[in-house]
Amino acid sequence: MSKKVKYKSLLSPGETVLIAIFFLAVLSLFYFTFFTPNYYNLSSPVKFEVKKGESFSQIANRLYDANIISGKLNFKIAGILYGTQKKIKPARYYIPNGLSYLGLIEYFIDGKADYLKMVKLFDGSTSKSIASRLRSELYVDSVAFIKELKNKKLLDSLSIDETSFEGYLLPQEYDLYERSSPREIIITIYNGWKKFICDSLKKSIVQTHRSIHDILTIASIVNGETNKKDEMTKIAGVYYNRLKIGMKLQADPTIQYLQPNGSKRLSFDDLRNNSPYNTYKYFGLPPGPIDNPGKNAIIASVYPDKHNYLYFVADGKGGHKFARTFTEHLKNVQLYKDNLRSSSK
């Protein structure tokens, strides 16, 4: 029969004490390293951005470089213990002073932060609609955003010799932080526009003998007329033809732009509006863009189709029918009305 081993016979009283002291020391070191507060010599809280695609190791290194933590290794070990290496989301964090390493890890996982979000701006969006989108998705003050769009100092600082950013906010996807300042968002979106208007495109614009502002104005009207890429160059060509012969643009989107409560069915009274944006009343281009045109509309306005069309009307199927003469146009209008009547029956 095997005899039961008595632990007391294996260890002397002195050895038992030494082992107990060792484990207490390890536990104390663990507690001191990961649970005791760490203090930084900075104004609290410290704003710290975790960027898109940034690794946990990069976050640790930047925290250390910013003097927020005193040990990169300890922070990394805390992350491993918590299993959070891939759980920290891109955001702006506001780190309070006195957090332990594990406390800091917990803060990155559950603390209050302004998260990075992808926001999509759609072609032909007005500045008002963009402001509304930013308010609902990023909690940005829409009134302050609209006001900042007309900030002359900001416009001048970006070499925009206009009265507003309308037309210069390129619709596409942007990564933006929640609760960002209107100025920061405007600059980010404008930089997207600036990147798109590359040197080769600028050279092509020069060849049109029109300014970038004119091109954006035409593009905004084109985007107001259609979202169909294959029609944009043809519609742009119509407006260039009208400008060439001194004909009024008579563009409905410019009248819609003047409506205080958004788009509506236009009346003859609307066409009498005494505004320079009323292209039924005044010749030439309106003072500026009526929305923020997308890339396709801008390209179409730089490279319009060459044709003899002067008129177009909706075909009732999402597209348009084009005409060279007013008589032909009236036939297309009547056809459109007939289609509406037949579809309503």
Image (tube, rainbow, N blue to C red):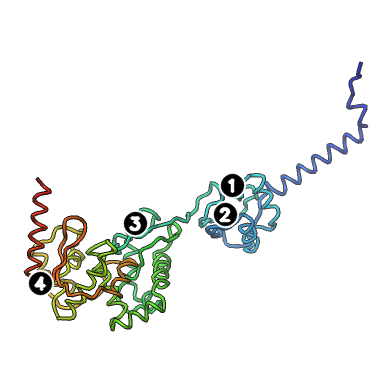
Point 35% across, 56% down: residue:
135
Q: Secondary structure at mark 1?
A: helix
Q: Nearer the viewer, residue 343 or 266?
A: 343
Q: Which residue is mark 3?
A: 133
Is residue 231 positioned above or below 3 on the image?
A: below
Residue 298 falls in image quadrant:
bottom left
Q: Mark 1 or mark 4, which has the lower sequence index?
A: 1
Kindly identify which residue carries mark 1. 106
| Residue located at (41% from left, 79% from top) | 199
The quadrant holding residue 313 is bottom left
Q: Is residue 2 left or right of residue 66?
A: right
Pick whichever of labels 1 and 3 is earlier in the sequence.
1
**Mark 3 and mark 4: span between their CA atoms?**
42 Å
Q: Is residue 103 left or right of residue 342?
A: right
Instruction: Determine whether label 3 and label 2 are within 8 Å by CB.
Output: no
Please tell me whether mark 2 or mark 4 is closer to you in this view: 4
The N terminus lies in quadrant: top right
Residue type of the residue flagged with mark 1: Glu
How many residues crowd around disc 4 within 10 Å: few (fewer than 14), some, or many (20 or more)? few
Cβ atoms at labels 2 and 4 below 8 Å apart: no
**Label 3 Cα crowd, 10 Å radius (few <14 / some 14-19 / many 20+):** some
Q: Could you tell me residue 18's position as x and y percent?
A: 88, 38
Q: CA distance from mark 1 to mark 2?
A: 12 Å
